[in-house]
Image: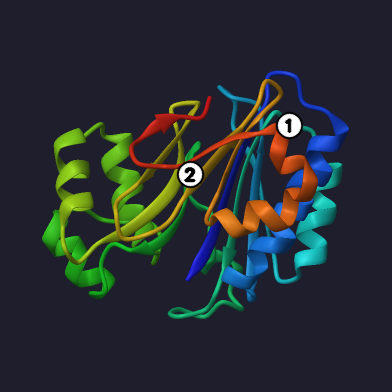
Amino acid sequence: MCGVIGYFSEKPKAIHKEILANILLESRIRGLHSFGVACGYPGKELRVEKFFKVASARNFIRKCDYSLLIAHTRYSTSGDWKVLENNQPVVVGNNLLVFNGVIRMSTKKEYEKEFGEKYKTDNDGEIMLKLLVDKKKGMVKDVLGDDRVSYAGIHYVGGKAYVMRNSRRPLWHFWNEDMSLVFSTFDIGKRALGAEMSFFEKDEVTEQFKLC
């Protein structure tokens, strides 16, 4: 189980950073062991940092300059979470991805053979990232429809961010005239936003959409 977070605003404000810091804090229940944050501006390479403590990640969110943020909280179920390279975001070149779920439970060698690819990381999220970078929409659809796959993710490919899930993992979208927020469960938003939640439109993500 992991938590994912996405944010975009054409006019970022200081208060947005506090909201995001709260969302990360409330998302920690879905990922207590490590935290990753990618932030910056659409069309440019995002700055990526990974942390072992939620306080460190929250401080980074408050200090970094951005209009786009993509973050992840990890609960350790496989791989050594003490090795930061094993934690998300999965980054390949200027492209990255955070997700909650499972694409393949097989070994890297086994899924490399299955997909006919060589992957740079040991995270099965790279399977999806490579398909997105290569614009293999048909294969992306097939993977999401596979009974073995559970997926709720945010990816940044070609300078643009997209949100995508299948029916086996939750994902929620909150938005108003100031910003767009994506996170794993409704309760996370309820706890993080408190009374401010009434100022947002909200809906469970049911299909892919462009975050920015």
The foreground one among 26 and 162 is 26
**Does residue 13 lie above or below 17 as drawn?**
above
Q: Is residue 18 visible?
A: yes
Picture coordinates of residue 80, whole percent (x, y): 52, 80
Residue, x 16% and y 58% (percent of image)?
146
Q: In the image, which disc is placed on residue 177? A: none
Q: In the image, which disc is placed on residue 96? A: 2
Picture coordinates of residue 190, whole percent (x, y): 67, 53
Picture coordinates of residue 73, whole percent (x, y): 60, 63
SS at mark 2? Answer: strand
Picture coordinates of residue 210, whole percent (x, y): 44, 27
Q: Amino acid at mark 1?
A: Tyr
Query: For residue 107, what is the image quadrant?
Result: bottom left
**Does residue 203 lie above or below 21 as drawn?**
above
Q: Is residue 31 visible?
A: no
The foreground one among 9 and 171 is 171
Residue, x 63% and y 37% (percent of image)?
7
Residue, x 71% and y 23% (percent of image)?
178
The foreground one among 187 and 82 is 187
Q: In the image, which disc is placed on residue 66? A: 1
**Does residue 177 lie above or below 201 as drawn?**
above
Q: Amino acid at mark 2?
A: Leu
